[in-house]
Image (cartoon, coloured by chain):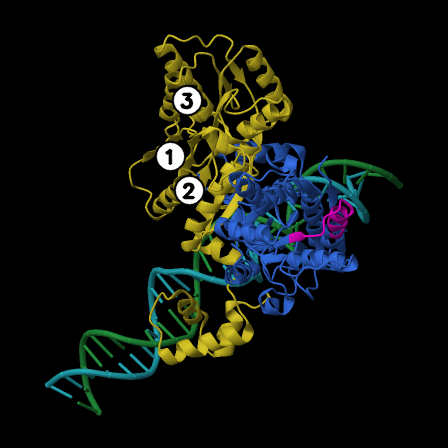
Chain colours: A yellow, B blue, C green, D cyan
Amino acid sequence: MSNISICDVAKHAGVSIATVSHVINNTRSVKEETRNLVLNSIQELNYSPNTAARSFKTGKRNLIAFIVPDISNPFFATLIEEVEMVIAKEALHLLVVNTKETKEREITNLRFLANGGVDGFLLASTFDNYAEMEDVIPKHIPVVLVDRRPAGAPYDSVIVANYQAVYSSVEYLIRKGHTRIGYITGLPRITTTAERLEAYQDAMEANNLSTEGFIRTGTSMSALVSENLDILLAQDCSALIVSNNMMAIQAMMLLDQRGIRVPQDIELIGYMDSAQPQYGTQYMSLIRQPVVDMGRTAGQRLIERLKNQDIPLRETLLRADFIPVH
Amino acid sequence: MSNISICDVAKHAGVSIATVSHVINNTRSVKEETRNLVLNSIQELNYSPNTAARSFKTGKRNLIAFIVPDISNPFFATLIEEVEMVIAKEALHLLVVNTKETKEREITNLRFLANGGVDGFLLASTFDNYAEMEDVIPKHIPVVLVDRRPAGAPYDSVIVANYQAVYSSVEYLIRKGHTRIGYITGLPRITTTAERLEAYQDAMEANNLSTEGFIRTGTSMSALVSENLDILLAQDCSALIVSNNMMAIQAMMLLDQRGIRVPQDIELIGYMDSAQPQYGTQYMSLIRQPVVDMGRTAGQRLIERLKNQDIPLRETLLRADFIPVH
DNA sequence: GATGAAATCGTCTACGTAAACGTTTTTACT
DNA sequence: AGTAAAAACGTTTACGTAGACGATTTCATC
């Protein structure tokens, strides 16, 4: 039953509620004998402290929220899993909020959860600019940015060196003799999309290659991937960079349907965004995101900040490896 | 800031806290003029109600926990996504707990969250028997079982007609002339594993086919899949049933590595456990799990039970379609 | 056994909110 | 204007817990 309070335990054990509370929380010394009395009563009554009352009193909820744009993307699923493991060790729980890449859902949830809802946020934001979300997040609540970093946000961040990874991958293709290299971006407006695209453009330019007609903006919506693919094929691209894992796998499937072989007929660069290997990726060169490391680090960062608000800002940049297809 | 209470708003607006509370919750009529006064004050002070205090007072947390064995499995990720969507419409939030197929983690979390932690549970349990978990869950708290149904549990459930789907798939293979049909199970002890295996055995037996040496017990651990695969190949199987999506994809990759073509050299039956199509599954016959439907239904069930504890038990059995490779 | 220090424990308040209960003001109708 | 009914609003309490503060008991030492 849940209607058993600390008060009932106190009565049953013949002590005060203060003693019971201190036994539970180990907050002052209690005689061995008394402690056992209390512990026995707790067991007998099957008492467990009321979480809500506790949070109310202490102001701590032992709860952190991870705001992700897309739960069913394996990238974020893995991230969630890693964060959960780190968090759980501290007896914290994880609230998962799926914004579905919607600014409005992000705002609503931040606002709702900020005031006493959770102790801190892990945020993979849909915003590219802090100004838009500034009002919603109270200053006192810890936030750690994961994977995406809206410009100007005064928070710890754990992100990936996207620029460098894409730049290397373009150079790799060029070294292999490709000159017509197509690029399919992810959702515009997201910080990672911009970084990756910029790297592609810079690398092409540095090698005096044109990007004219080679850049397509996409989402992982299947129809759009298909359309973008056909346009780039029509442009006679000999290599394609597809800027996230879900679209890359889709590109594989679509090329397969068209009877175009990878990597013999066209070379593909995709992403490895999850801990589990995916069938189909063995034929691509891959940019391997440090998902596991990112999840753990982000969780750790938040825990540290929960314990001490005054540590200086930390921006962590994790390397993404480029793995050429053999 | 978060240190703004209903009290401050009341003072600022020159009314009582009761009025503020009633404006916020729409719980009694307030003069238009006063209401605006209050609303303006709320806005000016950027007040939002303290969630913790509110939960404490009302006993409602607007929070439900979804206990899953493996977040990074796309099956559960999709389930989570669907549940979250249904839940969000009711202004409820979703706590995701990853048990990693561990009984102990399941127990710990159930116990911790039950007393005031959440309003209800969605549970994809690692237990196959209710007796083992009975003590931990208070009687008054609503639980809906998802995908797996521990024997004897007195809860609403939303599960899949596993038996029927596997039975049809075996019949399909037999009709095509296969007699040596291998079967790789999922984790033993899980309810779905047992149902599926039983169907395979019954269907084989009904057709006078032996299963001797054709059954391998597995997990999605890559090395184990590989070992099981080799053993079944050595048994000269012409068709394989692999009883979940992750293992099926792995089997594909391993067969690919060994130069064995699917479905020309060996026929494969796998699972489609997610809303997104996966590369590799186009070469298998598939048992399509009704993931989306299951998530929505389960969420709905729980919401209904939160509103009314007294409705009779409902056990929902969803059909899984068998889709032969063309 | 007297003393002070240390150990042990109890009383009571406060947290922010919702709502029961009570009071005042407004309205409708004679 | 007088009345009752209805509308509007304020005062107060209670929820379960943690911990400040204060009270009592135990203990070591003379």
In the picture, the quarter occupied by the N terminus of chain B is top left
Comparing A59 with A89, the one in front is A89
Q: Write down the quadrant of residue A169 in the picture.
A: top left
Q: Nearer the viewer, mark 3 or mark 1?
A: 3
Q: Write down the quadrant of residue B255 in the picture.
A: top right
Q: Nearer the viewer, mark 3 or mark 2?
A: 2
Q: Residues within 10 Å of mark 2 (few under 14, many from 20)?
A: some
Is residue B22 inside the magenta stretch? Answer: no
Residue shown at 62% from the left, 21% from the top: A226
Q: Is residue A294 left or right of residue A236?
A: left
Q: Amino acid at mark 2?
A: Val
Measure the C-alpha gap from mark 3 to mark 1: 16 Å
Identify the residue position indicated by label 2 in the image: A292
Comparing B235 with B74, the one in front is B235
Identify the residue position indicated by label 1 in the image: A157
Q: Amino acid at mark 3?
A: Glu
In the picture, the quarter occupied by the C terminus of chain B is top right
Residue shown at 71% from the left, 37% from the top: B325
Residues in magenta, as a range: B167-182
Identify the residue position indicated by label 3 in the image: A195
In percent of width and height, residue B166 lies at 72, 51
Q: Could you confirm whether marks 3 and 1 are on the same chain? A: yes
Q: What is the chain identity of the residue bearing mark 2? A: A
Q: What is the chain identity of the residue bearing mark 1? A: A
Q: Nearer the viewer, mark 1 or mark 2?
A: 2
Along the polypeptide, which appears first: circle 1 or circle 2? 1
- Callout 1 secondary element: strand
Q: Amino acid at mark 1?
A: Ser
